[in-house]
Amino acid sequence: MALGDVLLCALALAGSGAALPTKNGPKAAAQLNRREEITAYDDSLAAPTTVAAEVAYLQGGAPVSTDTKTIVVLPTAPRSVSVPSDDADAKILEALGIPGSAAPTSTAPVKADKFGISYAPYRGDHGCKDARDVQNDFDQLKDYAVIRIYGTDCDQVSKTYKAAKNTKTKLMLGVWDINDVENEVSKIIAGVEGGWDKIQAVSVGNEVVNKGEATPQKVIGAVKKARSMLRGAGFKGPVVTVDTFNAVEKHPELCEASDFCAINAHAFFDSTTSAAYAGKWLDDTVQRVKLALSKPMNVVVTETGWPMDGSPNGLAVPSLANQKLAIESIKKAFSKTPGDVVLFSAFNDLWKTKSMDTFNAEQFYGIGGAISKSDRYI
């Protein structure tokens, strides 16, 4: 059978060495796609672990093949998991006796009144979203405090500004190319038409040092140039550069040249962290970054999320159910400072390319599996 076929399998948990909760004894039936890891829960555990178990793939009630798979066992089962009824993880949770509820697939992101959300103005066919597309998207994002965009192409500054103008949502704008600061800042100035009250901050570059595209000194120079131009145009808000937490820990001067410390940090890329611990991982990461700085600064996480599809990375397994666990964990960890977190991302980014470098997950960070209306028929 093809890799993507939905199969009926029996999870032979007996003798695995873990007292996994089951509703129907040691063997539980579940529908799932063939994959390397399966997530389960055991309240008696103090920390995540993995066990090997034999999986029998059935067709028409008869076994067609068997295989040994890794089961990722987490210490605590979620009280309730609301995921699409045809999602593999929903079936696994049900088979293992973990409470859950089936719900229809939603194309709208999870509401979060004070958290931010990242947004890209590109269609799945690689074209630019028009003003109507952007407005339709923003209509679904009204409950986020801030919407972050990354650059100035596709006339995105003007389109997003007009879409946010009559809402309470603010924008975090961006200069993408630090080699073209003057041109991009000029587009920002023209796009907001003097309405700086809607702009929370402006970023200059995104993970440029981490990708090896520029030295910290060059990035700092770009930040200073952008800030000078923006101040001259009347913007008095923060101007920052954004890089990964790893890059900032190595080069704290990136933050020290910014008006706040802006980092991208995704627990999914830590193979030792499961979805339920994404919030703790992120909080620990922020604290480490603060220790690396030579002066007290507010640290804002400008990207963090969890993919709903892709390839596993150790204990970090992409799925819709795990994305829900991760986002809830992050929201709980930052419940007192939600304005310091921008979730990633508003919609699945179908314009991106799958790559094992990022575990084939780059397209699938849309919160709740959200798909932009402009991409639903691509």
Image (cartoon, rainbow, N blue to C red):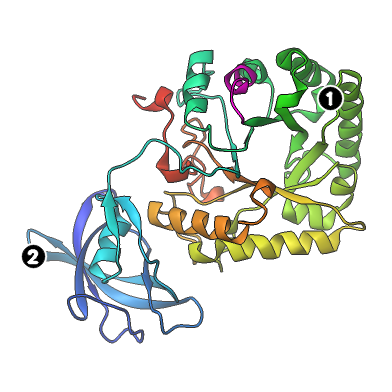
Give above or below for 301 relative to 164: below
Q: Nearer the viewer, residue 270 or 147?
A: 147
Q: Where is residue 16 in the image (x, y as percent from the top left)?
A: 32, 83
Determine the CA span between mark 2 and mark 1. 68 Å
Residue 26 appears left or right of 303: left
Q: Quadrant of residue 36?
A: bottom left
Q: Where is residue 207 in the image (x, y as percent from the top left)?
A: 72, 42
Q: Position of residue 286 (x, y in %)?
A: 72, 59
Q: Which of 238 and 204 is in front in this view?
A: 238
Give above or below for 55 relative to 82: below
Residue at the spot 43% in from the left edge and 49% down from the top edge: 308
Mark before the other along the chain sequence, 2 or 1: 2
What's the magenta bit mostly, secondary-structure-wise? helix
Residue 89 among magenta residues: no
Q: Which of 247 and 291 is in front in this view?
A: 291
Q: Tell me where the magenta segment starts and ends, as one range.
A: 159-168
Residue at the spot 48% in from the left edge and 36% down from the top edge: 347
Residue 181 appears left or right of 19: right
Which residue has dot 1 on it? 235
